Amino acid sequence: MFIGRLIVLVGLLLIAAGSAQAAGPKALDPVKARLVADAPALTPGGTLWVDLHVDIAAGWHIYWRNPGDSGLPTQIEWTLPPGFAAGDINWPAPERFVVGTIGNYGYAGSADLLVPISVPATPESGAPPPRIDATASWLVCSEICIPGEAKLTLDLPVGTAAAPVDPAVATMFAQARSHLPQAAPFAIGMAVAEHELRLFLPAAALAGVVRPTAAFFSTEANIVDAGATPRQKPHNGGLELIMPRLAGPAAGKPATLDGVLTLHGADGAARAYSIAATPVAAVAFDDASAIAAWQALLLAFLGGLVLNLMPCVFPVLSLKLLGLATSIHRAERYREGGAYAAGVVLSFAVLGSVLLILRSGGAAVGWGFQLQSPVVVGLLAYLLFAMGLSLSGVADFGAGLAGFGDRFAGRGGLAGAFATGVLATVVATPCTAPFMGAALGFALVAPTPVALAIFVALGCGLAAPLALASAIPGIARLLPRPGAWMVWFKQILAFPLYATVAWLVWVLIQEIDAGSAFAALLGLVAVGFAVWIYGRTRFAATRGRHVGSGLAAAGLATAIGLAALLQPSVAPSNSAGTKDALGYQPFSTARLAALTTEHQPVFVNLTAAWCITCLVNERATLDSAAIRRAFADRRVVTLKGDWTRQDPDITAFLQRFGRSGVPLYLLYGADGEPTVLPQILTEANVLSALGKI
């Protein structure tokens, strides 16, 4: 197809040249061009904007910077006085022209190509006017194509004071600038299949546009089949634009999609954005949607299953297993196992729904987003601290407060079992299991029902082991019989909870400033007082019990109030920039681009303080002597990006590799090509990847 279109282009140019030569230069002139300056005089040291204004006869069109399947872009060659410099053309948003199977991008009617020209500080007022010469050339096409050219001149005096601008010129430039694409204030994802390209527009892109029609114009040639008609359909509150890829040996497979996105509404609204779409994940394309969707669901279930082995889930899971050991009746185990599973699955569905809603609104968030909020981290630390105190015997909440102590251990009925499932989900989000990255990345670009099914599959995987243990009598019989050992075991389980609290407080300190950290620690004191006074007065006389309950409520209210006041620190976190075993430098896309341009091997570690998987990988693998020696021998530069707090730049970079959360490990060789390492690192797989660069 590409070669055929190349033949068509050459043929058109030959016909154009023959037609122009036979008819004479004045016989047909579909284009009138002129230069217009935005000011009547030159300002020394300033910038003069010049408009190449082109009027195009009806039925004809000229071409954009990427002309599409055929054609040539308009060009301007400048001849400027010494010290002057012309910038690049600022191209207005184009439109699409299709003749048969040939599609082109360009302009009809008229076009304004704006160019900035920097003026040196040396010209003096009263000197001869500097002469600005330009040779504009274009290809104008209708049924035939004709190359055109115009030699244009501007003679402007040098002025030291601002001169009044002709209102007609001011209006002309205002209209010209209104047609320039604006930088998109939202992130756009893309995916590539064998025959299709897809852009995923969030709901924020469509705000205020009634029944929008989208079009995309790639700045790079040989990517999109400009002659084929694109399709669009709703996607997670936004829009999915589906474009056939250009076929043939010259067709490219882009890592990103750079270009102009236009939106036209049924009410006449028109917008144009300059975008750089980045890959989000493997997508379920129409020709293989069932297979891809089932693969994602299976990966999600396996990822949830492996989460049960992660250290962040163990304390809560142990509490529930303790509850199963105390459940004598089979029916009771069935009910509580079902309630636990319902709590897990519903929580995953709610978390997934919130994540999809936020992303469809243009928010740069990913998996674990709730732990980027100091309020959530603080409240979770207070809850686990209260649970630990209850297990230690400071207070036994019994049936009075569902969700604490024994209710989480399973002796408090269905509400406690359900709450255990909710808590298991919340504390599982800092951990990332194998298979989860691809599944979550798929969920963020899949249709909403499929995306929610993936989150439900994650929940089913996490809930499956304990649900099966409660439902299958043979598994339950393997648990020890209730006895005195349970008191000891129950109190021992408090210490993993205290360790989790210590970790959460450490995470909190990464997110807030020193003053807020002190307030957060006072909140722990308030929780401790509330649990202690409740335990001391629970069995007192009526008056004492009421006083104790009131003081406990006051303590909890104080803790909650202190947590609500926690705000993220405005200063950058120190965890990403600390000089540890591998001597990390702070990550930025600019720094990464500079290093890869210099053909420097680079290792990228995107992490977060609340990501336990990340911390385990660093301590157990990346900080090992063998890894450090291998990195040093190959002179690998190491970059660390800290996602502890919300960072839209890191979020966008994660999306380029189809990830919705951390960790992400990348190893760039001297050729600048990245290798994505597994989320669970071993010394062997890191050394193997290093051996290939």
Image (cartoon, rainbow, N blue to C red):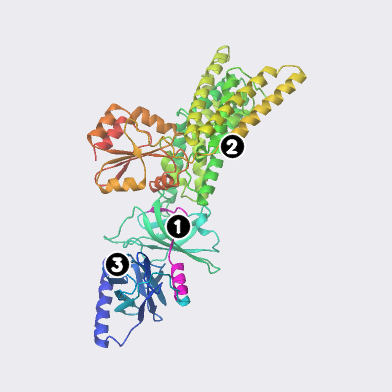
Reply yes or no: does residue 186 show up in magenta. yes
Amino acid, disc 2: Leu
Classed neighbour count for the residue bearing mark 2: other residues with Cα under 10 Å, few (<14), some (14–19), many (≥20): few
Reply yes or no: does residue 125 show up in magenta. no
The CA span between labels 2 and 1 is 33 Å
Residue 295: x and y in percent read 42, 43
Rendered view: 180 above or below 320: below
Q: Which residue is drawn at 74% across and 19% down?
A: 544
Q: In this view, does 537 lie to the left or right of 457?
A: right
Determine whether label 1 and label 3 are within 8 Å by CB. Answer: no
Rendered view: 385 above or below 248: above
Q: Residue 84 carries which label?
A: 3
Amino acid, disc 1: Ala
Q: In this view, does 316 lie to the left or right of 572?
A: right
**If you read the primary sequence from the N terminus, does the residue marked by circle 2 or circle 1 appear first?**
1
Rendered view: 98 above or below 677: below
The CA span between labels 1 and 3 is 31 Å
Classed neighbour count for the residue bearing mark 3: other residues with Cα under 10 Å, few (<14), some (14–19), many (≥20): some
Amino acid, disc 3: Phe
| Pick the front one: 595 or 22 | 595
Q: In this view, does 196 lie to the left or right of 207?
A: left
| Secondary structure of the residue carrying numbered label 3 | loop
| Image quadrant in which you'd find residue 382 | top right
Residue underneath mark 1? 184
| Secondary structure of the residue carrying numbered label 2 | loop
The CA span between labels 3 and 2 is 56 Å
Residue underneath mark 2? 565
Which circle, 1 or 3, is nearer the viewer? 3
| Image quadrant in which you'd find residue 139 | bottom left
**If you read the primary sequence from the N terminus, does the residue marked by circle 3 or circle 2 appear first?**
3
**Residue 221 shows in this picture:** yes
